[in-house]
Structures are given as C-alpha cells and as structure tokens.
Image (cartoon, rainbow, N blue to C red):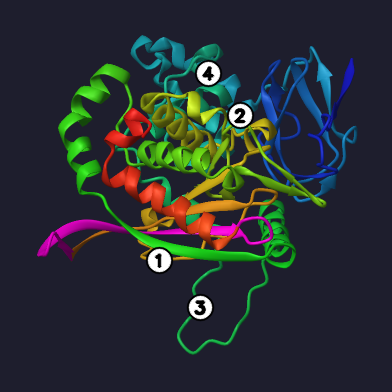
C-alpha cells in the first residue's frame, strides 16, 4: 500500500518550510517512526518521521524546495522490502570461516545501505567503530545516529566540530576577485527581519555599567565541586545573572513589560529568554517562571537549551514568548557591545568578557575580575532613570550575592 509522506501542520505564525535534508534515499528500507527528512522553518527544525515501515518508493520534493502544510514530500510502499544487492549474495560463502562471520562485518561499508553510507560519510565515522544491530550484522541508520549522539556527549569527541564551518564560502587565493553568492537560510532571514523590526519600530537606547565579580568568582570556586555533586550540574555564572536580573525586574516592573499598541502590558511573571548560538544562527529559548527555579534548575535548563540548540531539537514552544532576555557575548571574547531588543520585549541585558583589571576599592588599587554590562531598553516606555537603576540593581546583586539569596 502506497502511503504519502506529507508536510505536517506547521507551528502557528509559520506559513511555509524548506526541505533541509533527506536522511534516506529512494529505494531505501525505512522503519516506522524513523526520521526521513528535516524541514527548516524560520524558527526551528522539524523532523518528518515515517508513519509506517516499508520502502521509500518516491521522493517528490528535493532539498532546498519550499513547501507548505499538507504538501506531499514522497511516497512509502508500506510493508515492502528493499531489493537485495548483489554484494549480499556472496555473504553465505564467508560463513565457512566462523571467526569472520562476527558482527564486525559492519566494517565493510560496501555492504551497507545507501542511507547508512551517506550518513557515515557526512558524519566522518567509520562503520567498524559502530555496534551493528541490523540483520546479519549490518548497520542501520539508527545505529549510526545513536553512536554519533554518544560521541557528541564525550568531551574528547570534538574533531567533528569543523563540520560547522563547511557551509562557509571557500577561501579565495590572494589577489583573486571572485565572488560567491550564498542564499540566506530561513532562520538567518528571520533574524534579519526581527533585527530590522527592532531597529525601526522601537526607540532603543543602551546604558552601561561595570561589575566586580570577585564575590561571585570566590563563591563558585568554593562550592562548585559540592554543587555539581549535589545537583549534577556545573555552577556557572549565568544562574547568578538570571537571579540578579529577576531582582531588578521585580524592583522596576517596566523592564519586564511590553508595548501593545497604545498599551503597556505589565507581566506578573518572569519568562527569561537566554540567547544561544547554534550552527543555524542565534536563537532565544525561554526559561519560564524563572523566579520559581533554584540555581541548580537554572543551570540545568540553560545546559539543556544549549544541547538542544546544537542538535536542532528546540521546539516552537521553547522559542515563543518571553518578557526579558539575557545575551552573553563574553563567551566569544566580546569586551563591550550594544544588545538589540527582542520584540515585543522592552529590555535586554548584555554580558561580556571577564577581564582582570586594576580598580580602586576603598582608596586602594587592586586587581579584580571585571565585566562590562549593557542594558538596552525601549525608551518609549522605559525612562533612563529606571534603566540605569535597574542595571545598578543587577550590579549590586552580583557584587554582593547574599542579596540574591536573601532577596534584599
């Protein structure tokens, strides 16, 4: 029975998608719930699983095409089996040597399906390294994916990272005057649209300050090991900044508000957007009810955002809403920058690099770990006084972390 592979219902506000990658080829056997292809929207990547097992009989829409909900992407012949390859016919002859009939037959790439060979090539993996679960010791697509995910979780498994730079334009020879035209991805086009919207439709200003992170650094150094042992998460700087920002939002509610026409909407909750960099661009997943979370829960949530952003596993729900955002350019070495608002939010906190600098404390010149802070705000509803005092509240909470714990 022929079953059509259709574009699923797209998230609200998303009218179309782009076929990003087919993970199987025409003629390949597919299993029920196996991911067949990825669809790229202007916000998230969507997986399209097989509703039934069988053989991919036809691919109707190639990678790069724009599709809408309900469009037919391909056809599966349910219950069918993929045609046997001639190379497999010689397999029984090898059975005479028991030692060679072990599952290590997966090392022979030529005996794998086209989808497996393609995936191995894309990921730069060797079949011999991957445990096989398929019939006759053959690798399956899921075997490769599972192994790849396991390797990503290991600190040493970083050699594959250069893949992220593969789509970039090739370097030209010195003196060359060639040009290369590369179309924007949907998410990059969406980012450009939102940045222009923020620039053109808000009265954005930025106020700056600096913070001495000596107290936070000493607190982290003292408790990081016991914190990780107790909670299974590393104690980073972000949880301190999230808690400090929430204290500022509570004291100056307009920083947590948004503009809706001629109305100011004051939010009685604190949904904090955390800017995360991914291969597809900058995304801002939302940490909901952040004021209700412990430091450990904040750290775990941020870690989860980062992992899922890299794996293109963030959902529309993760990226929808938010009352205030935090972005950290310091992880890339930024000393100072002006963060751009994330509409309809009216304020965003920018963190930067931590640098040991000489500062004057109690009349003495001392060396302290210093960071520049930036708070961009919509001057239509936020006055300079509220922005400056809000940023100063963040500074004070970070320089005396007990204020965060005691909510002073």
> On residue 172, which mark appears?
3
Nearer the observer: mark 2 or 1; the answer is: 1
Q: Is residue 87 placed above or below 98 in the rendered structure?
A: below
Quadrant of residue 267 within the rendered picture? top right
Quadrant of residue 72 within the rendered picture? top right
> On residue 348, which mark appears?
none
The x and y percentages for residue 26 are 76, 34
For label 3, the crowd category at 10 Å Cα-Cα, with few meaning under 14, some 14 to 19 and many 20 or more, is few
From the image, tell me which residue sits under label 4.
91
From the image, tell me which residue sits under label 2.
113
Q: Residue at x 48, y 64 (%)?
A: 207
- Check if mark 1's residue and mark 4's residue have beta carbons within 8 Å: no
Q: Is residue 89 placed above or below 222 in the rendered structure?
A: above
Q: Can residue 157 be seen here?
A: yes
**Image quadrant containing the N terminus:** top right
Please state which of residues 77 and 182 is positioned toward the viewer in this rendering.
182
* Distance between mark 3 and mark 1 Cα atoms: 31 Å
* Distance between mark 1 and mark 4 Cα atoms: 63 Å
Q: Residue at x 37, y 53 (%)?
A: 331
User: Label 2's element?
Assistant: loop
């Amino acid at each position: 029975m022929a079953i059509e592979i259709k574009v699923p219902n797209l998230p609200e506000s998303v009218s179309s998608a782009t076929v990003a990658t087919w993970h199987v080829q025409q003629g390949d056997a597919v299993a029920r719930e196996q991911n067949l292809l990825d669809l790229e929207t202007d916000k998230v990547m969507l997986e399209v699983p097989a509703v039934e097992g069988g053989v991919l009989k036809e691919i109707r829409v190639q990678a790069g095409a724009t599709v809408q909900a309900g469009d037919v992407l391909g056809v599966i012949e349910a219950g069918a089996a993929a045609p046997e390859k001639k190379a497999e016919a010689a397999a029984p002859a090898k059975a005479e040597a028991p030692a060679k009939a072990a599952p290590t037959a997966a090392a022979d790439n030529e005996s794998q399906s086209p989808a497996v060979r393609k995936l191995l090539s894309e990921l730069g993996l060797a079949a011999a390294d991957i445990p096989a679960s398929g019939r006759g010791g053959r690798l399956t697509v899921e075997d490769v994916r599972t192994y790849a995910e396991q390797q990503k979780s290991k600190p040493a498994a970083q050699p594959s990272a250069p893949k992220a730079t593969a789509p970039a334009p090739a370097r030209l020879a010195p003196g060359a005057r060639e040009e290369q035209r590369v179309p924007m991805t949907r998410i990059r086009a969406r980012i450009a649209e939102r940045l222009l919207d923020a620039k053109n439709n808000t009265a954005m200003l930025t106020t700056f300050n600096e913070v001495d992170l000596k107290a936070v650094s000493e607190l982290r150094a003292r408790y990081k090991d016991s914190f990780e042992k107790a909670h299974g998460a590393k104690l980073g700087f972000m949880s301190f900044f999230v808690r400090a920002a929430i204290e500022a939002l509570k004291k100056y509610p307009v920083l947590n508000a948004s503009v809706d026409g001629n109305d100011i909407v004051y939010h009685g909750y604190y949904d904090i957007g955390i800017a995360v960099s991914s291969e597809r661009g900058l995304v801002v997943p939302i940490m909901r009810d952040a004021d209700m979370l412990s430091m450990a829960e904040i750290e775990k949530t941020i870690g989860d955002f980062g992992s899922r952003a890299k794996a293109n596993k963030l959902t529309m729900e993760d990226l929808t809403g938010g009352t205030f955002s935090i972005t950290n350019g310091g992880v890339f070495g930024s000393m100072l920058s002006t963060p751009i608002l994330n509409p309809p939010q009216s304020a965003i906190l920018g963190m930067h690099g931590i640098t040991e600098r000489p500062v004057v404390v109690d009349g003495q010149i001392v060396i302290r770990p210093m960071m520049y802070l930036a708070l961009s705000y919509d001057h239509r509803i936020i006055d300079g006084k509220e922005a400056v005092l809000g940023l100063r509240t963040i500074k004070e909470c970070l320089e005396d972390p007990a204020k965060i714990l005691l909510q002073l």
